[in-house]
Image (cartoon, helix red, strand yellow):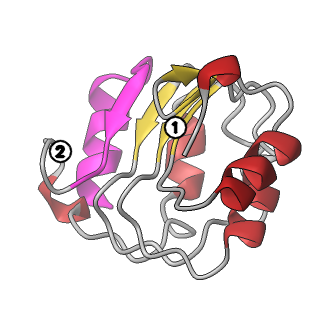
Amino acid sequence: MDDLQLLLSADPDTTEIQLNERYSLITSYSELEEINTILPILSDFVNLQILDLSDNELKSLPLDLSSLTCLHSLDITNNPFESLVEVASSLQTLPLLRSLSINLQTNEEVELILTSLPKLELLNGQGIFLVKV
């Protein structure tokens, strides 16, 4: 949490944060198991538009992500989520989400995400009209 606080102090207008093992400059966040404790700090980045939480150990997301008011792109690939239904419900609280990267295995999972997030424009880097499993 200290690294994220330092980033907030140094650059509160940051628009992109990567909290994953491969690319993160914030080394204390590799293999995150949950983000509830850091959500208040992430929310303080009032211009945060892109958040990469890929390659962690997230099993769920907070129920309410609406405090990330400017977030339009989220990468949550390679996380062992326990319930895609709950993840989709959490993602519905992101008011500006337009681009999502997430592991989906079946057409039913794709349909769940597309139905839950009707304003989504990109799913896994593809325009919605092109998405197939």
Q: Position of residue 53 (x, y in %)?
A: 39, 51
* SS for callout 1: strand
For disc 1, the neighbor class at 10 Å (few under 14, some 14 to 19, many from 20) is many
Please report the bounds of the magenta region as a residue range: 1-20
Along the horizontal axis of the image, is 23 left or right of 73? left
Along the horizontal axis of the image, is 28 left or right of 42? left
Question: What residue is at 33 percent from the left and 61 percent from the top?
Answer: 1
Tell me the number on the disc at residue 22.
none
Q: Position of residue 95 (x, y in %)?
A: 81, 31
* Image mark count: 2
Q: Position of residue 18 (x, y in %)?
A: 30, 40
Contact (Cβ within 8 Å) of mark 2 with mark 1: no
Residue wearing tag 1 = 74
* SS for callout 2: loop
Along the horizontal axis of the image, is 125 left or right of 130? left
Question: What residue is at 48 percent from the left and 34 percent from the top?
Answer: 124
Q: Earlier in the sequence, mark 2 or mark 1?
A: 2
In the foreground, 104 or 33: 104
Question: What residue is at 43 percent from the left and 19 percent from the top?
Answer: 15
Residue wearing tag 2 = 24
Q: Position of residue 26 (x, y in %)?
A: 18, 48
Disc 2 to disc 1, C-alpha distance: 15 Å
Query: Could you tell me the amino acid type at mark 1?
Result: Leu
**What residue occupies the far bottom of the structure in this picture?**
82
For disc 2, the neighbor class at 10 Å (few under 14, some 14 to 19, many from 20) is some
Q: Residue 101 magenta-drawn?
A: no
In the foreground, 3 or 128: 128
Q: Residue 12 magenta-drawn?
A: yes
Query: Could you tell me the amino acid type at mark 2?
Result: Ser
Q: Is residue 114 above or below residue 53?
A: above
Question: What residue is at 35 percent from the left and 34 percent from the top?
Answer: 17
Determine which quarter of the picture holds residue 112: bottom right
